[in-house]
Image (cartoon, rainbow, N blue to C red):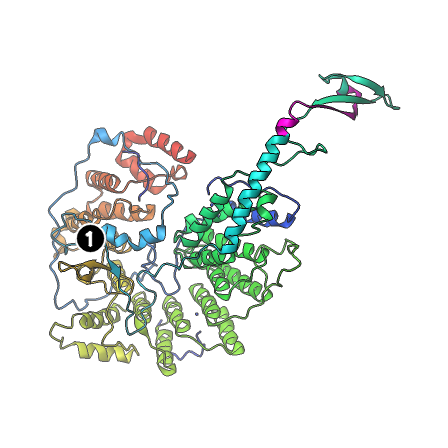
Amino acid sequence: MNSRGSRHGDDGKSHDLESLNRMPSATTPQIFTQDPQYQRILLHHNIQLQKQVLEEEQHDAVGDPRLDTQQQSPPLALQHVGSLGEPSHVVPFSSSSTMLPQADSSKRTQKTVTTGTQMAEIDHDFQRRNASVLEQEAREPNHTFPAMHDGQYRVDTIKDAPPYPAGKPWAPEPIKPVFIPSHIDRRLESMQRAIAIARKYYFFTSKKRKGFRVTKVVELPKVSWSRLDTQKQNLRTGPSQDIVKIRLSVILDGARSESGTRLQKPPSLDVPSHIRLHLDILGTTNSTDQAWHSYVYLVDTIASHPLIYHRVKHICYSHLHRFARLLSRNRPRTRLQYLRLLSVMTYIVHCGGQLKLPEWNALIHHSAAVRRKTTIEDVENALNVFKGMRRGELPFTSAFDPPEHEDMSPPSHLSPDAFTISTLLSIAARAKDETMLYRLAAEFERSYIPQTRYAHLVMFRYYGEKRDLGGVRHTLRKMSRLGFELGLDGLNAVLWAYGINDRLDIVWMIYSVLRHNRQSEVQEDRNIRSTMSKLKEESILINDDMIPNEITYTSVIQLFSYNGHFKTAIDVFIEMLSADNTEQGAPLYPSESGEPQPGSYAPTLVVYRALFIGFQRHGIPASRVKESGTPTWTLEHLLGLFERFLTLPEHTTLPHAFLDILMGAFAKTSDHDRDVMRRAWVAIDDRFGIVFAKSDGNSRLRRLHRLLFPGNDSEASRHSSQEGRV
């Protein structure tokens, strides 16, 4: 294979719980006397970043499957659900007759994709938000599915928000840029002149005193003196006869002052311009990686020489706070991102700045984003950050003395707001920590913080995963009583809670009403009123203008695919591809008349993963197709879906877990036909590239590769070693 990089129980009881929301290769800074504590903190956090980086995993408080294409759906109920109502109008599904490309055995022995991925200095946020544009390149579509939007560049985005709460925008606006203050510009100009003068003096003294010989007297053991290969003059023996005093003749090296003290080499004349460049990057980029590279370069450079430090003692506060906002909004939230945010906040405090409450809230949220499933340990981490916020003390900084700044403001002692408590509540709900939920409810009451709508939404996930639909209904009734609107984001959370509790009938009712609202031109379904009445019995009220969004489609496809309802899942998938994306922040494309118009939804890895899971769990082997009656999860349909899947952009990164699911689907439906599986592997590798790290030597996917390509072991091992060196 060609070597390429990865581009990649319902009891109805009442519930009394008051539910509540680096430039690369930067060197270690040199220590100088102006601020000895400055370096220790930075070095400490650099070590933390190198030692504690974990695999990036994403999570979201209400279960947003849209935020990261690598997200895995949570486990669903395994029990079979009876027949469900089907859509009144569906597009018949028939797979393409195109088969997989034949695998060339001569090429297979040459192709083992094991190259490493390098950190590209591009705007990853911007790239992700424009992924749908890249996905809509002009290709010949599978005739089974609706054609994708023609490959045009977007001209604008939808600005208007819907009349109901719908959660986060489809693509949020980038953070506003900040610019270099005028006084910093003047100091950089002063730094340029000072460096020029210092370099002139340094090289003058270096040339003037070059080759000068000076003498000095040293005492050393006699044994060591006997081995000295140097000029010996005026030897005198000490009283102990074991110590000798010797006058050594030494040639001066380097630049020295008149007193003979070695001079520190001045920085390069390019440093001021580099500082200005990296400040511009830090103030304008929407890429957390680019911003982090510039941040590390600036911190190291400012601390590297007194000439720099005396003029620019730290990065501008406006740039630091913008970087903190950028980190707090970036997805997915990972351990690495938590350490970066903590480093920036520690630097702000050390330089005499004041932290803002939203930054503390973001740090609390990131502190629990260590793994996919939130645990009690994550809750404790978040609580420790919360307690530190009240004391004005950041994590990992208690071992450091306060910086020696006389005019430094005292640490800020902030009181929590509704977002703080809601964030803690979300973490506790994901961890199913009932004790913490009660404590947070009491915290709401003690602090007189009004409960927010979001504080109630997070309880849907808690009750859903606790198999307590009575709690879901209780929360719905309470929101209605307090005047909180459920909104589309809340409805999606309710839909998921019912779905993972085997109530797919309620899931279909909710989706049917939302689809009916979108298709206003279609004659009213006679059963829609009856459906809405049944939902009202569950305290689920849906506005007439509320329509499904990407999360709705994705959730429904996940639930029905997992439970084996092929036709329903495929129908919803086709409806998703046919629907216009009118969400706030969605891209607009030019029409034939030049007017901007919305494009259709593009399929994501999450959707494909959900469908492939259906084939993996419920696939029908080819030998049993005739016995199964109506064909559903068959190889023929899998090939049609797979052909559509191969039209995703080449840079799409396929996680190994996703590949394992996809190959498992081919194994199940082909009755473990190695030829079919081999051609599927080659097609995936040719399109996206399959990457093996050195540590994957005995993974399940690696073992499958050896089984499908038995003559490729040595080649794979060689590439894996190269991958480890990258």
Q: Amino acid at mark 1?
A: Gln
- Judge left or right: residue 493 versus residue 641: right
- Judge left or right: residue 285 versus residue 608: right
| Location of residue 413 with respect to 257 vertically, above or below | below
Question: In the rendering, at what x and y percent does residue 462 appear?
Answer: 40, 68
Would residue 189 be seen by someone viewing this image from the given angle? yes
| Location of residue 66 with respect to 19 vertically, above or below | above
- Give whichever of 472, 56 is nearer the camera: 56
- Give whichever of 419, 557 is nearer the camera: 419
Q: Residue at x 51, y 57 (%)?
A: 317
- Judge left or right: residue 442 versus residue 606: right
Question: In the rendering, at what x and y percent does residue 136 appear?
Answer: 21, 52
Does the segment drawn in magenta span residue 475? no
Does the segment drawn in magenta span residue 217? yes
Question: In the rendering, at what x and y percent does residue 669 appear?
Answer: 20, 48
Query: What span is colored magenta in the figure?
Result: 206-224
Q: Residue at x 12, y 61 (%)?
A: 91
Regarding mark 1 in the picture, which secondary structure is present there? loop
| Location of residue 618 with respect to 551 vertically, above or below | above
Q: Residue at x 35, y 81 (%)?
A: 480
| Location of residue 383 with respect to 254 vertically, above or below | below
Quadrant for the C terminus in the image: top left
- Give whichever of 449, 123 is nearer the camera: 123
Quadrant for the N terminus in the image: top left
Residue bearing the label numbered 1: 152
Q: Residue at x 28, y 52 (%)?
A: 131
Question: In the rendering, at what x and y percent does residue 57 appear?
Answer: 40, 53
Residue neighbourhood size for the residue with mark 1, other residues' Cα within 10 Å, grouped as few (<14), some (14–19), many (≥20)? some
